[in-house]
Amino acid sequence: MSFTTNKRHHAKIGSHLDGAEDIYSLNKHTLGPGELAESEWLSAGLASPDMTKIREYRLQRVREKLEEFDCAGILLYDPVNIRYATDSTNMSIWTSHNAVRYALVMADGPVIMFEFDAHEFLSNHNPLITEVRHAVTYLYFTAGDKSKERAKIWASEIVDIVTEYGKGSKRLALDHCAPEGIHELQSLGLELSNGEEIMELARLIKSDDELVAMRRSIFACERSIELMRNYFKPGVSEQELWGRFQMEAVSRGAEWIETRLLASGPRANPWYQECSSRPMQSGELMGFDTDLVGSYGYCTDMSRTWLCGDEKPSSEQKDIYTKAYDQIQMNMQSLKPGLTFQELTLNAKEYPRNEYRHYSVLYHGVGMCDEFPAIPFSWELNENSFDGVLTPQMVLCVESYIGRRDGGPGVKLEEQVLITENGYELLTSYPFESDLLL
């Protein structure tokens, strides 16, 4: 089998444009986040990321893990995993629930994108992608009662590639796959392993170049938060306020927002209400969680809580805000390389769970989205709890949600931090509310 390189793809596509602008220059990843973001980053003195080095590093991380887990290759359907390995995207939200696009990364061989409608121009910005093929889809949406027949065709192509480049290994990792696909791959002799584990561990350690991109993403997110704040007034609905944040973020190269977690007043306790049509009232607290897959595909996951209007905060609001703030600050101070995940839990500041509602985790990893590890509360530790060690170049989010179980205000706060050789570095910098602290 001969490889079709990106260079040849460019020539082929360009020949069909009849003198129009080279389609490579129109790729969103080539164009970048845009002049608005670039001008703000320039003013802030933020360096530009070297995307070539980022792509090379990420692909190498995947291949190192494939070797470690003794896999011939990995088949990826998750858009975040595909982005990490190939830096190629196509309708990421839609393809997250429609299995019409996938990538096969061989440990020692080609990187093949199987593209929805064979749109090779979506990958022509990355020369590390060896070939683009037409995706074979067998989900019921596109295949109907012929799903099993199409799955056989799909599996046959995958097995042929693994046979050609696997050097005798028939062990293939995959992240997500429908039962029909798993059955057909196994029936053709492949041994399947957990690709989700491989990808989480690959993504765990960030390169310096990745951190350059993440710093820009965080800056753009925080700028969007500040502009959203201009619309935070009594009578504005939660949806309107969230819409302002999303508009500003997308204008700065953000790709999507994983949730719409913004809630005010009585809707903020308990947490996890997404924004609604409810108008916000003067004197009540409003909390939000960005969950933003931002510039260059890097996530900014931070939370803040604000007081609506010009009224002074109540003692109850100050008390609950201060508790959340203290939890964040004290739990950040625990961060240092060499600490185990379970030690992190046992050292953490917690509040009595019979009195207070809390967040789902104390800490979690973050990169291109929320990532491994998710660090639980002490009362959740048991014989099935996993462990690990904090390592330099890991990025974590430090979480807090505090709300009394008998009602009243709720406060959501969160910071994003880098584990360093000597401790940690705070990556997020948007200020907390001094008026809400005791």
Image: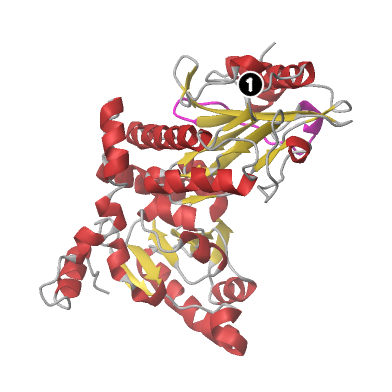
Using the image, determine if residue 289 lies above or below residue 305.
Answer: below
Dot 1: what SS?
helix
One can see residue 100 in this view: yes
Quarter in which the C terminus is drawn: top right
Magenta segment range? 378-394
Q: Nearer the viewer, residue 361 or 338?
A: 361
Using the image, determine if residue 75 lies above or below residue 316.
Answer: below
Magenta stretch mostly in which secondary structure? loop
Residue 387 within the segment the image draws in magenta: yes
Q: What's under tag 1, amino acid-wise?
A: Ile
* Residue 437 in picture, x, y percent from top left: 66, 14
Using the image, determine if residue 262 lies above or below residue 311.
Answer: below
Residue tagged 1: 328
* Residue 27 in picture, x, y percent from top left: 27, 59
Residue 159 within the segment the image draws in magenta: no
Residue reaching furthest to the left = 19
